[in-house]
Image: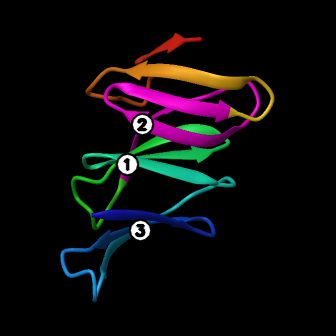
Amino acid sequence: MAYVLTGGNLLVFDVTNPASPALLGSRDLSGQASHISAAGSFAYVADEDLLVFDCNDPSSPHLRGSYSTPSSAIDVFVSGPLAYVADFWSGLWVLRYKMPLARTNRWTRYR
């Protein structure tokens, strides 16, 4: 799978054949999505808040969780259970997430 941000959309592609990627699904985003990081079938999007999309069904990515930073999340990188989130005014946030994610936050903040 490949996850791509374009305009106000999250796109999910099957890249099994790199010469001919196939669009599997998409999701409209409400904010100003700037960066994305993937871990397994989850896409983590910096879109003012940190948004976590479950793409187990790539035809219909759905929001599994979110985290609001003080101003605006502008970048994200995920490694293992940690999400490194750059916030516009307050700098780097290191968040540990617990699965399964729900709409209510299950995050521990390290800073």
What is the image's colouring?
rainbow
| Residue 32, image x, y percentages | 69, 55
Q: Nearer the viewer, mark 2 or mark 3?
A: 2
Amino acid type, mark 1:
Ala
Q: Is residue 78 left or right of residue 34?
A: left
Residue at the spot of label 1: 38
User: Callout 1: few (<14), some (14-19), or many (20+) C-alpha neighbours within 10 Å?
Assistant: some
Q: Amino acid at mark 2?
A: Val
Q: Which residue is under mark 2?
A: 78
Q: Classify residue 101 by image quadrant.
A: top left
Marks 3/1: CA–CA distance: 15 Å
Q: Tell me where residue 54 appears, x and y as whole percent.
A: 32, 47
Identify the element where label 2 is drawn: strand
* Residue 89 image point, x, y percent: 81, 29
Q: Position of residue 104 (x, y in %)?
A: 44, 23
How far is disc 2 from disc 3 in space, using C-alphas? 21 Å
Q: Residue at x 57, y 52 (%)?
A: 35
Contact (CB < 8 A) between labels 2 and 1? yes
